[in-house]
Image: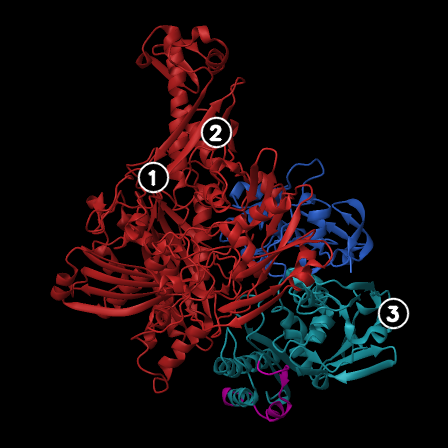
Amino acid sequence: MSEYRYIGRKRRTKEDPRFVSGRGRYVADVALPGMKHVALVASPHASARIVAIDAKPALAMPGVLAVVTGEEFCAGTDSLATGVDAPRLTRFALAKDVVRYAGEWVAAVVADTRALAEDAAERVEVEYEPLPHVIDAERAMAAGAPLVHPAHGSNVILHKRFVWGPVDEAFAKAQHKLAFRATWGRSATVPIETFGVAAQWNAGTEILDVWASIQMPKYPDQVARALRLPGNAVRVHYDVDVGGSYGVKRGLKHTVLVGYLARKLGHPVRFIEDRLENMRGGDMQGPDRFFDMQVAFDSDGTLRAWKIRAVDDVGAYAGRAPFQLGKPITAICGPYRIPAVEYDATSVLTNKTPQEAVRGFGQSPTNFAMERCVDRVADFLTMDRIELRRKNLIRKEQFPYTIPSGSTYDSGDYHAVLDKALAAIDYPALVRARDEARKRGKLAGIGISTCLEPSGGNSAFEVLLNPKNETTTWMDSCLVRVDLAGSVTGVMNTSSSGQGHESLVSTVIGEVLERDPSSVRVVRADSLQALPSNSPVGSRMAIMLGGAAAGAAKRIRETLVAIAAHNFECAPEDLEYRGGDVALKGAPDRKLTWDQLVEIAHRKFHRMPPDVEPGLQAKFVWEVPTGGALPDAQGRVQIYPCYSFEAHLVYVEIDPDTGKPSLGRYVCGHDCGVMINPDIVHGMTCGGIAHGIGAALYEKFSYTEDGQLAAGTFMDYLLPSAMEVPPLAIVDHCTPSPLTTFGQKGSGEAGYLGAPAAIASAVNDALAPLRAAIDTLPMSHLAIWKAIDAARHPERSEGSPMARS
Amino acid sequence: MKSAPFEYARAASLDEACALLAKHGDSAKLIAGGQSLVPMMAMRLVRPALLVDINEIAALKFVKVEKDGARTGACARQCAVERDDALAARVPLLRQALAWVGHVQTRNRGTLGGSVAHADPAAELPLVARVLGAKMILRSAKGARTLDAGKFFAGPMSTSMQPDECLEAIHWPAWGEGRTGSAFTEIAIRHGDFAIVAAAAQVALDPGGRCTRAGLGLGGVGGTPLAFPEIASRLVGAKLDDEAIDGAASDAAKESDPGSDLHATKEYRRHLARVLAARALREARDRAMAA
Amino acid sequence: MSERLYAIEVEVNGARRAAEVPVRMSLVDWLRDELRLTGTHVGCEHGICGACSVMLDGEPVRSCLMYAVQANGHRVTTVEGLAKPDGSMSALQDAFCETHGLQCGYCTSGMLIAAQALLDANPDPTGEQIRDAIGGNLCRCTGYQQIVEAVELAARRVRAK
């Protein structure tokens, strides 16, 4: 039971009522008078020179206002920024001179309706001269590979190697070593709502108004810069409901394009990606990565060191996506006491659709690789996978625990969470059930993963990976005001995509002011009014927005006490704040009520203490806890501040004759410190697990040899339905963070960070009796069957299935 | 994904639909449930000049259970067919197959005729039609003709219908034999997805447990749904033990000609063909034994 | 060719709506853009995600796979039509709020349509039947867990009345 009045207790969210009654307001619901619509002309080639574009047939079509090509667009706007040190990489919404991936946008058609724009887009004639292309990271790194951006000189846009601790020594001294490759297939979180943006240029006020399905930091700034407008000429309306994002909705190129069109044409313009544009040309695919893992360990199971070489295929352009190789440094030894780690990270360009930030920002693929490693060590030693983990997990007495790369894990009790999960699933019974199923001829397995969810969003990895970009500010903010009627409003400064931020803020403000959260209204400032925010990324909002809301509410509360102290002519320590009223300690009827205090603040300046502003409002802007430091010479730095933990257990049966997997019992033990709203946390954790099931078994942006996206619709990119996701049970544990206002840690990426690892563990446990293994995601029906078939007919396969997959 | 422009005509009768087809031929397309056609129009893969809507023709929506089988109008909704207990008793393979077809929403709108005429070689209803030897009643302005399923399906997404013909009804033959059992099974990646491979089987047994009649078909392993009447006839007279069933399944898989795509190689499909054919035969036999 | 128009009359959420619609306009686009019933959403436009689900003559269908002209003479119910006559939430809508069976809300209208149709036909569904009924509605936020709980809760509450 929660020790708080509101925090941690079951509470309906503020957001749900409008959505269940169909009253959400998404960007496609924003209708501006005279609005025009956009459709894109996309490249059919993975790599080609644009020889000529003839827009005349399109311009002749009914309802068409304009056709804009890269020639005009790239002259009229500035390139989007690349986060890594690759200054010769330019990136625009429309291709100029060359196209670098199949689906890249070549021209934009603006018409009275979307249908008319599509009609005209078909009539734009583009002549291409195909060029050599490359769609494999290793081939792209090899000498002689076609260069995606010749000006950069190679296809490698990032390569960093770090050695933390005595790695070589540990490998020399260890009793055993293992090496293998784990591969994370290209997938993403693919929200049901595609990206959309509407923009309107007001020539009178010289402001560009923007409504978008957006989830990213520094959005208005980057839009303004690319459009060559002053920063205060772009007004982003953060009160647009976003239909899911989970990282990917960073449609900068879409926004610059639509902003440009709106200014050029003098009409409001709206572009809603259709699903085909979204999948191929929206630039929202995810990590596409292999890990060459090496681990050094002893016969008793002690993990001595590991070397992780991560190579990621970022696609044809790069924004922040390569940093998804850097964030996992914050938890580069997982939840284990590994004293020495080497990490070698490479980001490679190919002629594929560019990646974007995906939930966890690279942590889930890394957790998957680390957990495969741990399972393989267990297999090698014929040691129980759970016992091996127990042995190596950081122990609760060891917190705060500093890992070799410099981050300190704030708090945790991994063994307790694991025990809770084991008890909840009745592990011994599950083992018996598995063994019974095996006797009946089934392939059956239990999967286990123990993984971290780093939270708080201190993106110090940016400086680590690109020292030229010296930046350490990761802040968030909240404004709280109490109006003349005594009602409370909290103002947040960014958009939301289902995380329940209005509920978060109102609950926190209610807790601090001891007022019913139902009475607290939460609104969003637009970007011209907003205090600084880094947006919901990196599982940071419960910590940062929650902390900012609490900080602002605390200032209000202190002001109320100060007003009362002045009026009672006493010290603040002599007073007691209760539910908004302030009374003398020991004399409870000598009090000023909330309403009286509000009235003094707003109307009775003669009764105000000196040096206190009239009215009742407070802002709070703060830096992420433990933030503000640059990496040291060895590349060590604190990255994320708070560490949530998850222990997954899942049962799988595989039909040995068809390779079809079927998930059974699923329990996730979860510790994210103090939960502000348990239903919100559980919901996101279940959603994360479903994302993880997709990544593990179903989802892949597959490419053909000639660089075409083969999985470009929902017929081939397979999202799990309620029939593929089993009932999920979440078991809670709480080790509060010492760094945050209420002990809360982040949980926006929960479930996704441990589920793929757990499911891979289960499938491999099921295949273990056949001595077959799979280290590549997704584990499709075909891949599972191939592994079974190869194990049953070893004479047919090339080499042992265990060596690599 | 907005459709390319088209003209629209809502046919009030089959005669009217046929007249429009006669007039416009290739440039007209019939729309029934639209569950397969509209996605293709949204992706602009199909762009008829005229869409002839036959959803409002009441005379095409019937379900008639008769002594020798059942007749369904081309626009009988999949959900209505699924719910019809008398039909399920007479032609059990239909309900068994429909359990695998799409989702509630697609079955509420999709029609039997539409699915059959769409002729996806991996689709469930065309496979049932092929295995049972269903008869398609086709109508045009010139008259009517009946085509056996074996002649109806011409290739992937392609039938022998002329551009001026409309499917009016399907006759699904029932077996008169006493102890009859049928089964439908498939492997799809997600629930409701297109089948990678599907198998349908129907057997009849004599009181001694020997097979007196058999039907076996596979979907997703050729340009059309495949039936194996010769392999099935070799089961007649035998007890349907594992050896007989596995033999038949293996023969059927050898005769199939699957392709490779994103989700399955041809080797995998051929393997599934063998496994699923055997499963369908086994399940059909078990049901016949219990009948 | 400018857009060919066709006159239709459709009963939408109990009200008779007459209009001239472009022939190629999908039912979901007509509901959203012309009738401004923006509670129904577009997710894929090729009949897989279910965000566009509405009831046609009381049964859930994908409104992205119908043209508005095809709805002529029929009854359509959207999420805006699920509330009680007095405007308050239905038992199902309220249950979704109770179990927090949604997050971003984008798939929610489709889920409500599918779930309401299930409860109309089957007041006591099993978990498996609920999952089957919403099997054609994709959600990326919730993992379906709290959605299934909402439908179970609504079923219990309605049965208890």
Chain letter corresponding to the colour red: A
Distance of label 1 from label 2 (alpha carbons): 23 Å
Quadrant in the picture for the N terminus of chain A: top left
Asked if residue A74 lies left or right of residue B219, the reply is left
Name which residue type carries label 1.
Thr
Magenta stretch, residue numbers: B221-244
Give the residue at mark 3: B16
Rate crowding at label 3 as few (under 14), some (14 to 19) or many (20 or more) other CA atoms within 10 Å. Answer: some
Residue A215, visible in the rendered structure: yes
Subunit of mark 1?
A
Callout 2 secondary element: strand
Q: Is residue C47 located in the magenta-colored stretch of the structure?
A: no
Q: Residues within 10 Å of mark 2 (few under 14, many from 20)?
A: many
Asked if residue C119 shows in the view, the reply is no
| Marks 3 and 2 close (CB-CB < 8 Å) | no
Q: Which mark is residue A490?
A: 2
